[in-house]
Image (spheres, rainbow, N blue to C red):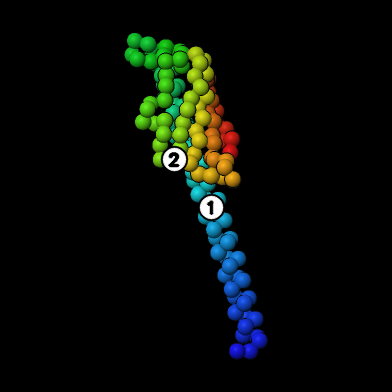
Amino acid sequence: MGQQQILLIVLGMIIVGIAIIFGHNIFKQHSIDSKRDIVISENVNLANMAYQHYKKPIKLGGGGNSFESWQIPDNLKITVSGEYEADISADIVVITGTGNEIVTGTDYVKVQTTVTAENIFTEVLN
């Protein structure tokens, strides 16, 4: 083989290597974004459950304008997407969802949803 052909083969290998690395990075970022969206969705679902409990009268099994007797259902504390825990008081619930997708190093996808009598607010922590 001539030098020109060897140079073209090496150049082709470099381009293919860069394309593989670029594709891997795009796939990883898409995976993180998808997991974050799922955790947000599950957090909001739990927040809606807490809000329904807050609004439902005590006679019907609700909280009667209090979050204190609400808790995350056992089958929703750990899902395929992550783990969920709630900090509950009479007038506010803070639900923290930790996904099982590593963002960087040992940091996982983390989303926090705050539920009050007036609104539901979701914040992406990681």
- Residue position marked by numbered label 2 in the rendering: 81
Hey, what amino acid is under mark 1?
Lys
Q: Relative to 118, is 6 on the left or the right?
A: right
Residue 97: x and y in percent read 50, 33
Q: Which mark is residue 107?
A: none
**Residue 48 visible in this rendered orientation of the protein:** yes
Q: Is tag 2's residue or tag 1's residue first in the polypeptide sequence? A: 1
Q: Decide which of 19, 47 is in the foreground and name it.
A: 19
Relative to 1, 42 lies left or right: left
Residue at the (54%, 40%) spot, across then down: 108
Quadrant holding the C terminus: top right
Q: Is residue 85 above or below residue 27?
A: above
Position of residue 29 measured from the top left corner of the image (x, y, whole percent): 55, 50
Tell me the amino acid under the disc marked 2: Ser
| x then y, percent, for residue 42 | 44, 34
Q: CA distance from mark 2 to mark 1?
A: 16 Å
Asked which secondary structure carries label 1, the reply is helix
The answer to whether 110 is drawn above or below residue 34 in the figure is above
What residue lies at 38% left-to-right and 15% top-to-bottom?
62
Residue at 34% x, 15% y: name it: 61
Q: Quadrant of residue 63?
A: top left
| Residue 120 shows in the view | no
Is residue 79 left or right of 36 when viewed as pictured? left
Please report contact status of discs 2 and 1: CB closer than 8 Å, yes or no. Answer: no
Q: Which residue is mark 1?
A: 28
Quarter assignment of residue 54:
top left
- Label 2 secondary element: loop
Q: Hey, which residue is sitting farthest left in the picture? A: 60
Quick one: 122 or 29, which is closer to the camera?
A: 29
